[in-house]
Amino acid sequence: MGVENNTRDIEETVVTDFTDRMSYGGYLDLDTLLSAQKPLSDHHDELLFIIQHQTTELWMKLMVHELIGAANYLRNDDLGQALKCMARLKHIQKTLTEQWAVLATLTPSEYAQFRDKLGNSSGFQSFQYRAIEFMLGNKNEKMIRVFDADPAAQEMLVAALNAPSIYDEFLRYLARKGYAVPASILERDVTKAWTFTDELMPVFIEIYNNHDEHWEAYETCEELVDLEENFQFWRFRHLRTVQRIIGMKMGTGGSSGAPFLQKALELTFFPELFAVRTEIGK
Ligand code: HEM
Ligand SMILES: N[C@@H](CC(=O)c1ccccc1NC=O)C(=O)O
């Protein structure tokens, strides 16, 4: 039987009594989740602003989880599982980059009506964002101080600062597989930002020039390139959204605003994987 009167019958077997059963809202703790939106103004658009940030933080929570997973799998030489984590990470990144379109419906006039309520709070203080940057190799000890007033966040961030990045783990994996990764790289101080290392180039040139013989390493290199590219796309959409909403105003976090965000577009996580492109087929 099809639908009648444009109304779908609820089937006899559908469960409706949840007095002693776990329900959807109970499992997902929706009471907590949906009571966490607390606008500080009466402005219609503040809910959009809050939900855009909260959904981003939720997806970033999964990104942290997947990045930890990927690093652990690499450490255990389980490349297949590490690649699965990276594939999921890339889809989350795409979702987050697309999501900027929702916030871009906020006009400068609308935002100006509640911006003063935000005080000095800023995305700059997102510990999950900072952890993701650290896990990808953009380490910066100075960021830790921002979290002096939040010991739990700070502890998590210090752990991410002290742990090898996903790139460090990949290079260690390559070394275990017999690739000539210099010892100085394997023993480097992982709390410092990665900087371009010329001695690594022969390893990647070999992998890219003879990719059939190095398929697993080659595929992983390209996954890392995708991750970096997607990260830059997110940063770019953030910058463009900021430009259209606050122009050249300073940030609530105290930075110069757009010029500060622009500088991040010059950062790179895996410089050798981009440099190798110049060398292919020479
Ligand atoms: C009206 C929308 C937004 C504006 C005007 C804006 C503006 C800014 C500005 C000016 C900064 C520089 C730090 C400062 O001085 O405050 C910044 C940083 C940041 N914002 Fe936003 N932002 C917006 C939306 C978002 C959203 C939705 C997120 C998602 C969580 C986000 C995440 C971040 C992060 C992670 C940083 C630090 C970036 C870095 O260290 O390179 N922002 N934002
Ligand atoms: N930094 C933004 C304010 C802002 O966007 C914001 C404020 C509180 C919590 C998260 C935010 N998002 C990103 O920076 C501004 O300068 O307008």
Image: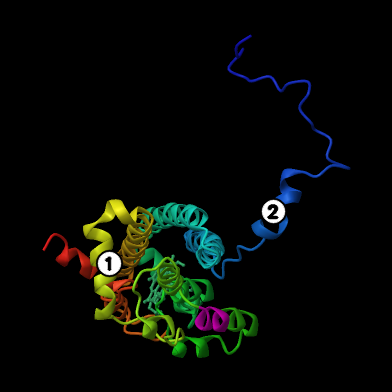
80 or 231: nearer the viewer: 80
42 or 195: nearer the viewer: 195
Real-space Cα separation, disc 1 to disc 2, in angstroms:
48 Å
When the figure is inspected, residue 189 is found, relative to residue 180, above or below; the finding is below
Mark 1 and mark 2 lie on one chain; the one further toward the N terminus is 2
Q: Position of residue 74 (x, y in %)?
A: 50, 64
- Res. 166 image quadrant: bottom left
6 or 75: nearer the viewer: 75
| Residue at mark 2 | 30
Q: Position of residue 33 (x, y in %)?
A: 66, 58
Q: Amino acid at mark 1?
A: Phe
Q: Amino acid at mark 2?
A: Leu
Residue 265 appearing in the image? no
Residue 187 in the figure: left or right of residue 244: right
Quarter holding the C terminus? bottom left
- Which disc is residue 204 wearing? 1
Q: Residues within 10 Å of mark 2 (few under 14, many from 20)?
A: few
Q: Secondary structure at mark 1?
A: helix
- Which disc is residue 239 wearing? none
**Residue, x 72% and y 44% (percent of image)?**
24
Magenta-drawn segment: 157-163
**Residue, x 44% and y 88% (percent of image)?**
189
Mark 1 vs mark 2: in front:
1
62 or 248: nearer the viewer: 62
Q: Residues within 10 Å of mark 1 (few under 14, many from 20)?
A: many
Question: Is 267 in the magenta?
Answer: no
Q: Position of residue 78 (x, y in %)?
A: 52, 58
**Residue, x 35% and y 60% (percent of image)?**
230
Q: Position of residue 196 (x, y in %)?
A: 28, 80
Tell me, yes or no, whether the two marked residues, 1 and 2, touch with CB atoms within 8 Å: no
